[in-house]
Amino acid sequence: MASGGAAPVSASDLLALVQQGKAGEAARRASRALKKAPRDPTLLFVAGVAEHANGQTRRGITHLKRAAKLEPGAFGIALNLGTMLRAVGDFPAAVAELERANAIQPGNAEVLGQLGMALVQADEPVRAIGNLEAAAAGSPGNAEVAFWLGTAWSKTGDHAAAEKAYRSAISLDPAHVSAHRQLGNMLTKIGRFADAAVVNEAALRLSPGDGAVLYDLAHALASSDAPEKALAWLDPVIETGKAPPDFSELAAFAAFRAGDAEDCIRRCDAILERFPGRTTAIAYKGMALNEIGQRDAAAELMAMERLVSSAIAEPPDGYDSLEGFNAALVAEIEGHPSLQYSPLNRSLTRGRSTDELFENPEGAIAAFRKVIESAVARWSQDHPIDAAHPWLAQRPRRTRIGCWANIMDRGGFHDVHFHPPGWLSGVYYPQVPAGFGDGVSGHEGWIEFGRAYYMLRSRDEPPVRRLKPEPGMIVLFPSFLGHRTIPFAEHDHRISIAFDVMPA
């Protein structure tokens, strides 16, 4: 057919052009043909496929939606429309369209696979698993289906099943970088650092020069018993001067774990010179100063007496008493749908935690945000900017608040940790058991500041500051300050709400 001619064009000819890598030409010819036959579902289908192949997926979706209205029972239209909706990130719509395709042709492995993937992306991993397992049974050599099945299991917290699926994906496609990376990330999160390092090193061989993969590998090595190997990977990247500060902070962590606290300090100073106020660099520097016995320098940096504050909160608007507010807050936390025991929260032992509380908050949780904002405003007035202190010298212009709750069982505790994403952190106690330590015979259940992050494997016994929780007490402290909960023996639950004020 001559270019620009008026001769009829067939759908098969257009599809052949797409298959030949000439999607742009196919899309242009289909567009001209549609001017004469705008309600031809076959032309609309082919035009949609061509636009998608040409990188114009949203145009393709428009064509396929029109085709679907004209031929609602067409399997190919439903499948391709669902796939394209996935590609643009409209996962709920993709699920609906792929379910329609599955109703037209039940049990099709391709549809079940695409539907399972869309359900994972729509944050419905439980529903996804059945579809992906059926897809895997119908298409047993499909590495992508195995990969998404691993992701679905990982989201549900079944890490053994996730590992099996990820390893199946790698076995089917040894070059599947995403399967290596996701498996490595999951193994790191559950504390299997040496296993994660093996997987991440394989990922780096598949994707050499990938900074994210290299960071994952170095993190796994530093967190296992090979911090020197982590430094061997990190230092060449850091020396280019182009690495983000996260790489240098990970190197400082590795240096500490390698037993060289002085090198950790040197690295933290270099970070703070280029990136003033970095929470993680300040944290590691203070901990390392204590590790080498420089108590005065550590005390000046941590400034626990100066920077840690506590007070009993006022009940927010709508609540007559603090007791009533606390009771409402406890009820909402105990009934929160995300509350669960999680092996991913490795600093928390014998306790449950929630996800983000300020995502569509209501009731007492929404009111609690006002409690935080008032406390932070008072804290900021009491702690003006101080150029002599590396943390007080700067303050974020705009902030956002992240918030989550913890319910500890008898014997529960938080090991020493700090909050890298934050600037200012805090904790509120709506309920504490009676019979906590009295400060003379013991400090069970108290919050303690000043120790080194538990992953650093510090041997130091530094000076600490302890506070006894009380119902309605809110504590504010710099996010760089290591803190922990001392285990307690009471039967009642200890409930706390933690939050971070982070740069926006």
Image (tube, helix red, strand yellow):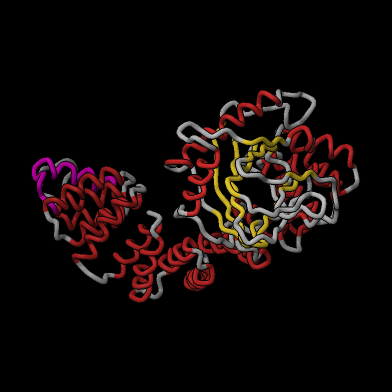
Q: Say whether residue 229 is left or right of residue 113.
A: right
For the question of whether residue 319 can be seen, the reply is yes
Q: Nearer the viewer, residue 471 or 220?
A: 471
Q: Is residue 40 above or below residue 306?
A: below
Residue at the image point whose x is 61% and y is 31% from the top: 375
Determine if the magenta segment contains residue 30.
yes
Q: Say whether residue 279 is left or right of residue 190.
A: right
Q: Say whether residue 195 is left or right of residue 452.
A: left
Q: Nearer the viewer, residue 408 or 500?
A: 408
Determine if the magenta segment contains residue 383.
no
Q: Nearer the viewer, residue 141 or 157?
A: 157
Residue at the image point whose x is 85% and y is 56% from the top: 459
For the question of whether residue 233 can be seen, the reply is no
Q: Is residue 399 above or below residue 101?
A: above
Magenta part, dominant SS = helix
* Range drawn in magenta: 24-41
Residue 34 placement: quadrant: top left
Label total for image: 0
Q: Position of residue 128 (x, y in %)?
A: 37, 64
Q: Position of residue 181 (x, y in %)?
A: 55, 60
Q: Is residue 330 above or below residue 396?
A: below
Q: Is residue 494 above or below residue 146?
A: above
Residue 353 placement: quadrant: bottom right
Residue at the image point whose x is 39% and y is 67% from the top: 129
Q: Position of residue 245 (x, y in %)?
A: 68, 41
